[in-house]
Amino acid sequence: MQGLGDQFRSGDACLRVRDQGAGAPVVFIHGWTLDLDAWEPQAAAVAATHRMIRYDRRGFGLSDGLPGRAADAQDLARLVERLGPGTVTLVGVSQGARVALAFALRHPERIAALVLDGPPDEVGDAANAGDEDFSIAEYRRLVAEQGVDAFRQAWRGHPLMRLHGGGAEARSLVERMLQRYPARDLAGAGEPPPPAAGAAALAGFPRPVLVVNGEFDTTIRRRAGQAIARALPLAEYVVIPGAGHLPNLDAPRAYNDALLAFLRKQSRAAA
């Protein structure tokens, strides 16, 4: 397989890419306000046995272009196509988990396995408890009235961004990513919320899936993760102790152990 270098052209956008290691490809997809550096605590461990590809989604980090669900889908499809024939494993966190799952449901033939970390509600019943993660509309108003720095100040204290462990290095990493976040998706009216994939679509997915939540993730995300794991026929569900919504940063050793155990299991099954 040809290396991707440090940039990947997708349509009218240039995406920052990090491509390292060799072996079966694993593509990592970051969450909202983050970028590819979010996966730095996983880099050495994963790249020791797999080809690890991570990228800044369009409009995030150092990638240009306007963010959006349709663009995310096209960018990921082009990236997977660029990797050549065969299957890939996708690892998505939070909003990135939604991107990964949407692609996997459309193209199961390209998927070896899937990891959904802190996923949004894709079954459709978790939000009925009335526990909302956050209001995009309120953050758009905040940016319009007070600017991006006011949003950053509000968002860094939100439970979805709160670290329970990880130390000073992890907190510094999160802060650097937040400062790079350009908030292009908070300009204007934005897109309507995406519909849930639905339990029926998940029930037909034929590939192994690891669903991950941090022990201290929000109630709605833990409920969503459990519901998705129940709906998927080949799913495993793992809780990372002592971690919040960003368990790969909060508890990287435990997270890496769970992730690598899952990847090794899929490698043995494919052998």
Image (cartoon, rainbow, N blue to C red):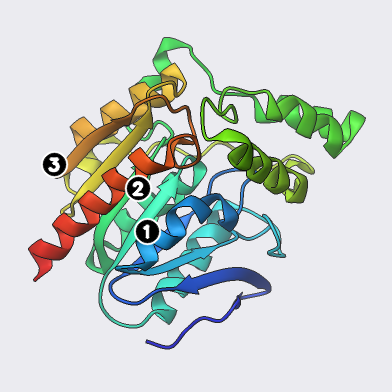
Residue to which mark 3 is pinned: 233
Mark 1 residue crowding within 10 angstroms, few (<14) / some (14–19) / many (20+): some
Tag 3: amino acid: Pro
Residue at image point 50% right, 40% down: 249
> Which residue occupies the extreme right position in the image?
146
Q: Are marks 1 and 2 in contact (CB under 8 Å)?
A: yes
Callout 1 secondary element: helix
Real-space CA distance between mark 1 and mark 2, rounded to the nearest whole angstrom? 7 Å
Across and down, in percent, residue 69 comes to 55, 52
Callout 2 secondary element: helix
Quadrant into which the C terminus falls: bottom left
Is 82 left or right of 271, judged from the image as shown? Answer: right
Q: Is residue 182 visible?
A: no
Across and down, in percent, residue 144 comes to 87, 34
Residue to which mark 1 is pinned: 45
Residue to which mark 2 is pinned: 256
